[in-house]
Image (tube, rainbow, N blue to C red):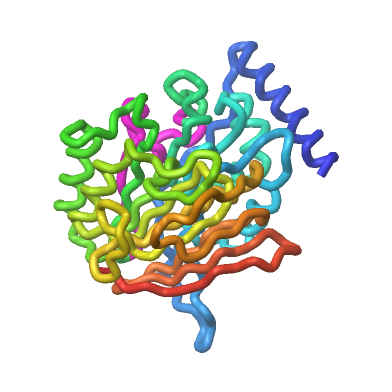
Amino acid sequence: MRSTVAGKVAVAVLALLAVTCGGEAPRPAAPPIVPTTTAPPPGAVPGPDLLAAGDIAGCRSDGDEATAALLDASPDAAVATLGDNVYDRGTNGEFGGCYGPSWGRHTARTRPAPGNHDYATRGATGYFGWFGSAAGDPATGWYSYDLGAWHVVVLNSNCPAVGCAAGGAQERWLRADLVAAPARCTLAYWHHPRFSSGSTHGSTAAMAPLWTALHELGADVALAGHEHHYERFAPLDAVGAVDPERGIRSFVVGTGGRSHYGFGPTLAGSEVRHSGTYGVLALTLRPDGYDWRFLPQAGRTFSDTGSGRCH
């Protein structure tokens, strides 16, 4: 760990010097994600379509190196970051020196979401500079894309910066986007979880209007980070009650590598809770449903697997 951290610190210093002297931190381009169309050999188990985690990189930790190795093992999967991509302030230098050596090598297949630490730099300019057009319009930070048969929505949960209120620009865009999308199955992700049993941050009431829109328009799965642990919920309705028929199954996956947080009182619908293991959530997205598996860092044994059907 010490040599890895020292190396990242050295790279971060060089990146900061480049920015200070009028240069820029590396900003890899992000071409459109094209799902692989190569059929697996007979009897082979399909690989995941999407790998996701949030709360990822820092120059004083090497947990992100452990989770980046999990991304290395599935080169055909898209990568979703669930916010707080790099600590502490999401600067150009931190992206170049701390995120770049680990998850940064997968930038070309990454579709990110911004977190509050990314916005610690005014306007999240380090975040938008690193990810470029893949992160959406820097004025808003929300966007959508299709992945196989699924429609994927990426929201900006930094509500003080961009607004999350009912009737606001983001909520109106979300409703219009979901109505226009022809896909049966919908996945959404962002940083601050609507529901969480975490003891550090917990649930995010400001996301209620966006969660309500997702529920009303039939979204199937939601991912978030912010709490540095793993939690899986049963499908929930607009107010957080278990709704097996029309609810949204949600996961908190703040296990990207930064640190570990604990849990407070268990919320209704919480089915699995675990802290102390870095890892990523692997999703296989079928035309009528999905399979999930939590992939732990090397040397750890915790996992969580299951399947669900789209509405």
Residue 103, relative to residue 187: is it above or below? above
Task: Indicate the quadrant where residue 104 lies.
Answer: top right
Quadrant containing the C terminus is bottom left
The magenta stretch spans residue 140: yes
Does residue 79 appear in this view? no
Across and down, in percent, residue 95 comes to 59, 31
Query: Residue placed farthest to the bottom in the image?
Result: 43
Q: Residue at x 32, y 60 (%)?
A: 236
Does residue 47 appear in this view? yes
Task: Indicate the quadrant where residue 285 lies.
Answer: bottom left
Q: What is the magenta range?
A: 128-148
Q: Residue at x 30, y 47 (%)?
A: 144
The magenta stretch spans residue 1: no
Across and down, in percent, residue 300 comes to 71, 64
Side of 77 where 215 appears, left or right: left
Across and down, in percent, residue 162 comes to 32, 27
Q: Of 110 and 26, which appears nearest the observer?
A: 110
